Image: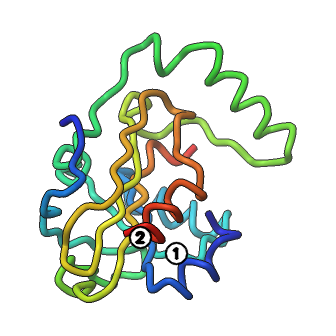
């Protein structure tokens, strides 16, 4: 996503990253990652619920695929922390047009289930 | 929710880590991509 920041800018797309975690953890994440998008806090998760992003099952969240994804992240040098909040809350991505209409809506089925940037770009381009 | 595509997005007001408020109304006239994270580990 960060590599596409210029593309989003040139296509008039503002990116907001949302977390439900506590403010101190969100600030720590910003400091550690240098994320260039605003990281907004949604503690009561009403936005998650509004877009149908629920809590995953144990099988989906703790499955072997997720463990392998974390191992790959660690091998790539990414620093991982012990979870400080709900590990079962799933996320997703939502693209909203200038009139407030949802044009792309992806609800993750598992922690490693995310759309590609190309899919999101296609939704913007084809609108 | 099967899909929200084609529906009006809910209004929101969120505060970022620098204390700045982000309202959905602030982004009218512009595309917005919401990336809703799971936990930040």
Question: In the visual, does B41 lie left or right of A18?
Answer: right
Residue under label 2, please give it: A16
Please tell me whether residue A80 is drawn above or below residue A32 in the rendered image.
Answer: above
The chain holding disc 2 is A
Question: In the visual, does B36 lie left or right of A29?
Answer: left
- Residue A18, image quadrant: bottom left
Residue under label 1, please give it: A37
**Which badge, 2 or 1, is on the more N-terminal residue?**
2
**Quadrant of the drawing holding the C terminus of chain A:** bottom left
Local SS, label 2: strand
Q: Nearer the viewer, residue A31 or A11?
A: A11
Q: Where is residue A67 in the image (x, y as percent from the top left)?
A: 67, 22
Q: Nearer the viewer, residue A34 or A24?
A: A34
Local SS, label 1: loop
Residue in the picture at 36% in, 63% down: A95
Q: Where is residue A83 in the image (x, y as percent from the top left)?
A: 52, 36
Q: Residue at the front extreme? A: A126
Q: What's the CA distance linking mark 2 and mark 1?
A: 6 Å
Q: Nearer the viewer, residue B1 or B12?
A: B1
Contact (Cβ within 8 Å) of mark 2 with mark 1 = yes
Question: In the visual, does B32 lie left or right of B26?
Answer: right
Q: Nearer the viewer, residue A96 or A68?
A: A96
Residue in the picture at 38% in, 45% down: A106
Please tell me whether residue A31 is drawn above or below residue A77 in the rendered image.
Answer: below
Residue in the picture at 42% in, 81% down: B18
């Amino acid at each position: 996503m960060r590599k596409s920041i210029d593309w989003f800018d040139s296509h008039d797309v503002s990116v907001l990253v949302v977390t439900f975690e506590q403010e101190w953890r969100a600030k720590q994440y910003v400091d550690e990652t240098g994320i260039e998008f605003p990281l907004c806090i949604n503690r009561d998760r009403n936005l998650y619920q509004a877009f149908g992003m629920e809590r995953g099952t144990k099988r989906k969240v703790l499955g072997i695929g997720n463990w392998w994804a974390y191992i790959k992240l660690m091998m790539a040098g990414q620093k991982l922390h012990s979870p400080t909040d709900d590990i079962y809350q799933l996320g997703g991505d939502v693209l909203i047009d200038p009139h407030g209409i949802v044009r792309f809506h992806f609800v993750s089925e598992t922690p490693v289930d995310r759309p590609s940037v190309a899919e999101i770009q296609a939704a913007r381009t084809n609108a | 929710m099967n899909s929200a595509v084609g529906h009006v997005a809910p209004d929101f007001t969120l505060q970022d880590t620098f204390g700045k408020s982000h309202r959905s109304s602030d982004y009218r006239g512009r595309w917005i991509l919401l990336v809703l994270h799971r936990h930040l580990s």
